[in-house]
Structures are given as structure tokens and as C-alpha cells.
Image (cartoon, rainbow, N blue to C red):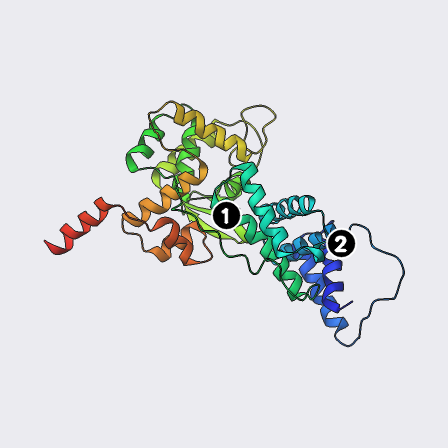
Amino acid sequence: MSYEKLRNEIAATLLQSRSSGDVAAILAVIDQISSGYEISKRSTDLIVAEEFPQIIKMYVASLAVENKSRCTTEGYLRTLRAFFDSVRKPFDAVTTNDIRAYLYTYQQQRGIKNSSLDHIRTVINGFYAWCVREEYLVRNPAAKIAKIKSGPVNRPRMTALELETLRHACSTPREKALVDVLYSTGIRVSELTALQKSDVNFDDLTVIIQHGKGDKRRVSYLNPEAVVSLKAYLASRTDDCPHVFVSDRKPAHPLTKEAVEQALDKIAARTSITANVTPHAMRRTTGTLSLRRGMPVEQVQRLLGHANISTTLTCYAQVDDSAVQDAHTKFTA
């Protein structure tokens, strides 16, 4: 057994009871101490049961140590378990044709879009690429499977008029604050549900997002509408829950992702808006309207917490024909 394999097993075991930050610190100490030793695995006749589920756990543990979000690692784990449950082979016996057959059958049975199918391909390929890097395998059986092409992705977002219509359809302080904070900050729903009152500073109109995607910390901002509606909502509460958005039922507890989605559905149902109003549609609306109103793309990237500016450009810098026509009139008249 190589040192890297031993290191991965240690990480997988530690992550069952410790945070990824603690595990990274422990591994750093182990790396320093073990640098002067040669490590080899003791010979044994015992056969480890359920070898490929363990290798998946080790892979997911390596993602956690790299600060991948919990949501991402759990999604990868579900995808890989479903794949191996279907092919019913040890990880090192899977062939390229096994993966192709799985992807074809999965799409036929589930009717999913090509973009969703390509995400599954990406997860499987990522796992096997890691196996090769860590020397569990000499080749990646998914490497020959090309990216699955898909048509233009429909990314729902609202117009300025639809956003204002949604705001006027709110009937409670919590609904108004929810819509205004989602739009003003461009926050992800997972970040919103984790937001605490101590993260909000009304003096400088900032919101500290402590655990963004990849466990990164960033700052967002409140516009005047969000300040007024959020103050009104917080003043209406009598509970002592530290979270910004909580349930209506007592005792109060932090809103879940599903509860936020249901709240937006109820508000949208009172309007004639045809767009699918979701937390992510609110986030896309923030990015799109900010760009169209002149915010530099680099600042939009920081506001939304994108690690790569290409994500901002791909998802939010799309302009329609009317915007091009307006620009043409401005610059060529």
C-alpha cells in the first residue's frame, strides 16, 4: 500500500467524526512526521468486504478535504452508489462499455436531459480519474466517453417588471424580506438558510456569508428595499432563534430549502408571472439585471461568489436583442 492510499483511508475514517478543516490539519501533521519513514502494508490473507463502496467513501473523503461543499459530496456519493448498484461489478472491473450502457439505460428509463446525463458522466469520470492519480488503477474506463452534447440551457430569470410584481404580491413581513434579501444579495438558497442575524450589519448594509459554496466566506449587500423589509420582519418576531429566516410555527427553527421554495411558489401563485420563480431564478435575476444596468462583470462575479469568471459570463452575461438594439442606438446614433 502506498502512503497516499493509507492517507486516504485515514482521511475517510476521520471525516466520520471530525470536520474537513480538522482533518486537513491532522493530515498535515501526519505528512510532516511520516516524511522520514517508509510505509508498507502488512501481508494478510483476509479479504476486505465491500471493496468498491469503501473506495467511494475514500474518494468522497478526498473531496471533503479539498473543501468541496457537503451538498456536492453527498450528490457525488449518491450518483456513484447508484452506478455501482446497477453495474454490480467491483470498481476495478468496470469497462468503458459498462459505463456507456449504464448512461444509455439510465436516460431511457428516467427520461432525463442530456445536460443531466452529462453530469452523471462527469461524476463517474472524476471518480476514475482520481483512482488513476492515486494509483488504484492504471487507466480510466470513462476517459474515452466524450462530453454529451445538449442544447441551450433554459436558465429562468425574471424581468424587472416581474420582480416588482412579485414584491407587491407579498402578504407578510417574512415574504417581503425573503424576496428582497434574495434579490439584493444574489444569495444561494443554502447560504440563505444558514444566514444568522449576527451576519447582518445594518450600519454598513452588509451581509457576511460565512459558508458559501466550497466553504468560502464572502460579503454581499443590502439595497434600501431589503433593509426596510428585513428590519420590519425581524421586528415582528418574538422568538430567540439566531437565524435570519425561521419557520412560522413554534418553536421557531431555521427555514429549510424546501420551505423557501414553497414560500416563493405561494407568492408567485398570486401573480400572473409565467416564469418559474425559484431561489436560483432570483439569483439569476440579480446577476442579469446587475449586468444590464452597468455593473462590471468582475464585480458581479464577486457578488455572486463565482470561483471562475467564465461561470458568470456563461450564466449571466447573456443579452437579448432589445439590449443590443439599445446599445446600437446609444453608440452609433
Q: Quadrant of residue 156?
A: top left
The residue lying furthest to the bottom in this view is 36
Q: Amino acid at mark 2?
A: Thr
Do the residues bearing badges 2 and 1 touch, measured as CB atoms within 8 Å? Answer: no
Judge the density around disc 2: few (<14), some (14-19), many (≥20) Cα neighbours within 10 Å: some
Residue 44 locus on image (x, y percent): 89, 62
The residue lying furthest to the right in this view is 45
Q: Say whether residue 232 is visible.
A: yes
Label ID, residue 13 = 2
Give how far apart the Cα atoms at labels 2 and 1 are. 30 Å
Secondary structure beneath dot 2 equals helix
Residue 76 locus on image (x, y percent): 61, 48
Closer mark to the observer between disc 2 and disc 1:
2
Q: Is residue 55 above or below residue 200?
A: below
Residue 34 locus on image (x, y percent): 77, 71
Q: Is residue 75 left or right of residue 329?
A: right
Q: Give the quarter of the figure containing the N terminus.
A: bottom right
Q: Is residue 198 above or below residue 92?
A: above
Residue at (75, 68) in percent of width and height? 3
For the residue pair 4 and 270, the one nearer the viewer reads as 4
Residue 68 locus on image (x, y percent): 58, 53
Secondary structure beneath dot 1 equals strand
User: What residue does disc 1 label?
Assistant: 209
For the residue pair 148 and 269, the one nearer the viewer reads as 148
Residue at (47, 46) in percent of width and height? 115
